[in-house]
Image: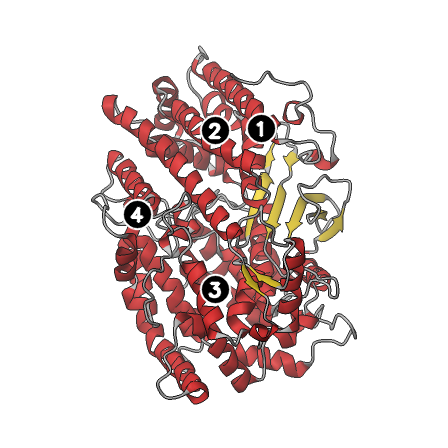
Amino acid sequence: MTEPISSSNPFLESYHTPHHTHPFDRIRTEHYEPAFREGMERQNREVAAIIGNHEAPTFRNTIVALERSGELLDRVCQVFFNLMEAESNDDMQQLAQEISPVLAEHSNNISLNKQLFARVKAVYEQEADTLKGEDRELLQKTYDSFVRSGANLEGEAKEEYRRLSMELSRLTVQFAQNTLKEMSNFRLVVTDEAQLAGLPESAVEAAAQTAREKGLAGWVFTLQAPSYRPFMTYCADQELRRQMYMAYMTQCTHGDAYDNREIVPAIVNTRMKLAQLLGYETYADYVLKKRMAENSANVYKLLNELIEAYRPTAEAECAEIRALAERMEGKDFEVMPWDWGYYSEKLKNEKYSIDQELLRPYFELDNVIAGVFGLATRLYGITFRENKDIPVFHPDVKAYEVYDNDGSYLAVLYADFHPRESKQSGAWMTSFKDQWMEDDGTNSRPHISITTNFTKPTPNKPALLTLEEVETFLHEFGHALHGMFANTRYASMSGTSVYRDFVELPSQIMENFAIEKEFLHTFARHYQTGELLPDEYVERIIRASNFNVAYACLRQVSFGLLDMAWYTRHEDFDGDVRAYEQEAWAKAQLLPVVPGTCMSVQFSHIMDGGYSAGYYSYKWAEVLDADAFSVFKQKGIFNREVAASFREQILSKGGTEHPMVLYRRFRGQEPTIEALLRRNGIITGDK
């Protein structure tokens, strides 16, 4: 029985908060379902009004009216599904399983509505050639969305589309919940201090704190990145490294309630059938129709070019690691995947006298925040002001008001930095409110969020980040700039609402600053002494920046190959997920295959995270960002004119034009792989 709508439900009231931000301090789990249902009912009435309009279909009374519909439902969805990743609980997860198919059915009822599509189609046929700019893009996007959501299907095919889309919704929610539970449930408890040999003080302190939080003696290590990564990099106990690696790489394979080995084929097969219903041979064909890459042949061309260019260097890198390991452990020693991080760090330190722990004291989180925000000020003139009156969804979260270079309000930025059991692993940017223009010309500004899993403070130390975490911060902040600078008429095209293989350009271009001396010297100071990061350390960072770069490239390529293998299928998969995975990425693998391990069952990006048939995007965008950042390098990394052009031509435009048009306008040419190869040292000089 549906719960009656409460007058105290914050979703159903006007927001009396700064910038109309969500009242997270008042939102409770019991508020979601009635708000979801009221949101669907309101949108149904809005759609019925569009269909029942006796006037002839026009862009304004049909396309714009549809764009503006569902405001309440959108608000509830943005809060609920964002918090499902950042601050989940068992009740929310249960509701997600129940409400996701209902939401899918609601969406289908709109996209498969014959009368509504007839009006959309009429506008498309009558006005497509007369509309200009964003209006034309919105019309094209709306029409394509209906067609790609089954509007042209008839009879049994239409009902099959409904069934499959609802099933896919259920499966992806289950996949995500299983991966969160598996990661949260694991802990490695160490009670023998001798087994901590090699681990830095920061990792030991963090493990002791985790043990105290869980009421356990000794030290507790988890699969969350701030615990797992230093453990695999520094722990001298090979057996413990093996245990941690196997725990990580066998998640969701244990034959229990969280096993994803049957869910993966179900997701893959369902997506394939949906694509085939719509006239495509494979799901990749369907996805890539709306990507810069355009088709799977172009994706494989990029991946194979990268393998050809990087594999010789990657093999040489592996040989160096093996030689070091044999020198340390004996001639017959075989480097296994759980050894890679440990011996890589040894070699890196031997070659460059640099490691993450040496740098960590210079990257205190508050200083890094000031440095990253300061970079945005140097480039774009924007400023950040923490506002503690803005409600947040967890005490760890900070909320900032962002002001433009003319002093006007630009956006709200939420920053959620540290891991917790209620939070998914990884790092991401999302939006709690998109940007759009009201009919009266008011620019409704966005509320953006960045979420990470950075090293936590301990009783003895503040949060001290690794250089890799600084790069991750810059990456997600680049996405945030894309969202905050949004300046389009329609919400569905603002900010990061762009082709998936273009969305990583604004984020990856920001990573380049992590090894720029001019930037590092704006904030990197020792948290105790205040000493600026020494020039010598900066030089070591720069020299080490391409350490194992080819191995890292092939690792990313292997993920791209795995993704494409799953989504270029044209027949149902009913085989062994592990065996299929090993065959799919074999030509990009450099280390021994470990029986029992499986990536697909925990690969959220391609199963439930929006990168299905799109993981190649990271390497595609890396080609773009290497080429684009060369402009900053030529004219100065803080050059305001270059930054202004990047903001105007890329960051503010959202999905209002084809991304290659935007890129050419900024760069003056199409990108080539050469800039990436040069940045990585794969080619040098005139070669």
Judge the density around disc 2: few (<14), some (14-19), many (≥20) Cα neighbours within 10 Å. Answer: some
Q: For residue 582, which quarter of the picture?
A: bottom left
Which label number is shown at residue 284? 4
Q: Is any part of residue 394 visible from this angle?
A: yes
How far is mark 3 from mark 1, CA to CA?
38 Å
Decide which of tag 4 and tag 2 comes sooner along the chain: 2
Q: Is residue 120 left or right of residue 397?
A: left
523 or 344, which lies in front? 344
Q: Position of residue 49 (x, y in %)?
A: 48, 14
Residue position for label 1: 32
Disc 3 to disc 4: CB gap under 8 Å: no
* Camera sees residue 687: no
Q: Earlier in the sequence, mark 3 or mark 1?
A: 1
Q: Earlier in the sequence, mark 1 or mark 4?
A: 1
Q: Identify the mark nearer the N-term, 3 or 4.
A: 3
Residue beneath disc 2: 99
In the image, residue 640 above or below residue 267: below
Q: Which residue is the site of mark 3?
A: 244
Foreground disc of the pair 1, 4: 1
Which of the 4 quarters of the picture holds residue 137? top left
The residue located at (44%, 78%) in the rendering is: 681
Residue drawn 37% across the image and 88% down it: 331
Q: Nearest the camera: 676 or 207?
A: 207
Residue 53, above or below 403: above
**Which residue type does callout 4 highlight?**
Ala
Q: Are marks 2 and 1 in contact (CB under 8 Å)?
A: yes
Single out the mark in the foreground, 3 or 2. Answer: 3
Amino acid carrying label 1: it is Tyr
Dot 4 surroundings within 10 Å: few (below 14), some, or many (20 or more)?
many
